[in-house]
Image (cartoon, grey):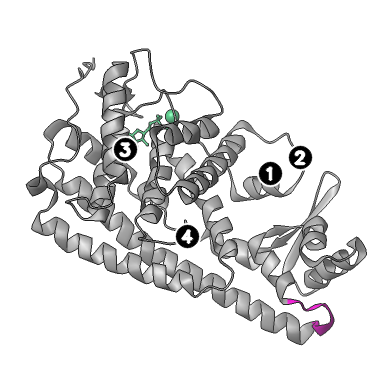
Amino acid sequence: MSQNVPYSKLEKLPPPIEKVETIRILKQENLATAALGELKGIAKLIPNQKMLINAIVIQESKDSSEIENIITSQDELYKALSTQQTHYDSQTKEVIGYRRALNLGYKLIKENGFLSVNNIITIQKELISNNAGIRTTPGTVLKNDQTGEVVYTPPQDKDEIDMLLSNFINAYNNDKPEISPLSNLAVLHYQFESIHPFYDGNGRTGRILNVLYLILNNLIDIPILYLSSYIIRNKSEYYRLLNHTNKTQDWEDWIIYMLKAVEETSLKTIKKITAIKNLLDKTITYVKEQKPKIYKKEFIELLFEQPYSKIDYVVQKLQVERKTASRYLKGLEELKILESQKIGRETIYINVALMKLLKD
Ligand SMILES: Nc1ncnc2c1ncn2[C@@H]1O[C@H](COP(=O)(O)OP(=O)(O)O)[C@@H](O)[C@H]1O
Ligand SMILES: [Mg+2]
């Protein structure tokens, strides 16, 4: 039988500097900083940034939810987002809630230039679609997915949770932390998850806070760096190292894990956005050659902003009649750039090559 792990006091931030600034950490921090800097520069060169953000945010909503065993397919998700159908399954609904929460968080930091505890509560509420807020009733524990064994007990007392959250948010908004910003990201993510302020949604809210932190600290300009796909590929390490840090206060391996996640994901994201840009250019050239009469740059860009497109979007974006919009979409279907699908009474047009690229 498993033994419950009693709550042992969670230390306030910051941790002792010698624990978070080891040589191994500094080496990995350099690699991560360089990769992220490169991504920041390359993202700037993409003309239509909305196009990148939209697709990458959708992918992250799916991945971050998947860590919590909320699973939907790319196709379900895009269909739900692009049609008027309202009867999608509950997991798809949750993923869409994640996307709303992420966009809301982005808007809040853009407006305010910092994040407040109330903002975090608002973000989690948007995500979970309930009003429970910060935990007030004891009983929340973290269990091992497979064995059901309790691995960690977060603080149970409301006053203590509030105190730790206010300590957390000060460290989060501190723009001159003693520790370098990417290592600080790792420390903050650990701390937020260990406070575990909500009954549910802590993992996903914490991962939204990660990208907002990068933006607040000018490490990236637009919300396109997400660690969830890395965490999915290295999931047991994610749990093991959070847990190891709980038990030992030894931060090194956890911080290195997060720094590697930043490095690897930055490099992958560079490849991905470069591929998207190349596909966009290739598509533009091809349509210009094959169907010069329906070629319009904004039209092709729309198909990259909305990989599941439809007549309404074209009407809005190009200010054309429905008949014209339909002719445009059908024209590209003939070129096999788009594939149409009927959903209820609507027809959607899928940018097949882009969807394939996004899935990889
Ligand atoms: N030992 C641990 N210490 C601190 N945080 C942990 C530990 N194990 C798991 N976590 C965090 O808890 C999250 C799950 O909490 P939960 O509230 O269920 O989030 P969600 O609803 O988004 O699934 C994980 O994603 C992870 O970030
Ligand atoms: Mg959960």
| Mark 2 C-beta closer than 8 Å to ligand 1 | no
User: For ligand 1, which image quadrant applies?
Assistant: top left
**Label ID, residue 222:** 4
Front residue (pair 318, 25): 318
The disc, 2 or 3, on the residue closer to the chain's N-terminal end is 2
Crowd class of label 1 (few under 14; some 14 to 19; many from 20; radius 10 Å): some
Q: Nearer the viewer, mark 2 or mark 4?
A: 4
Crowd class of label 2 (few under 14; some 14 to 19; many from 20; radius 10 Å): few
Q: Amino acid type of disc 3? A: Ile
Q: Amino acid type of disc 4? A: Ile
Residue 85: name its quadrant: top right
Return the residue at label 1: 80
Residue at x 56% of width, y 77% of height: 278
Q: SS at mark 2? A: loop
Whether tag 1 and tag 2 are in contact, CB under 8 A, the answer is: yes
Q: Nearer the viewer, mark 1 or mark 3?
A: 3
Return the residue at label 3: 169
Q: Amino acid type of disc 1? A: Ala
The disc, 2 or 4, on the residue closer to the chain's N-terminal end is 2
Residue at x 61% of width, y 65% of height: 354
Q: SS at mark 1? A: helix
- Spatial distance from mark 4 to mark 3, Cα to Cα? 22 Å
Which segment is the magenta one? 291-296
Whether tag 2 and tag 4 are in contact, CB under 8 A, the answer is: no
Q: SS at mark 3? A: helix
- Spatial distance from mark 1 to mark 4, Cα to Cα? 25 Å
Whether tag 4 and tag 3 are in contact, CB under 8 A, the answer is: no
- Spatial distance from mark 1 to mark 2, Cα to Cα? 7 Å
The disc, 1 or 4, on the residue closer to the chain's N-terminal end is 1
Residue 331 in view of the camera: yes
Residue 194 in view of the camera: no
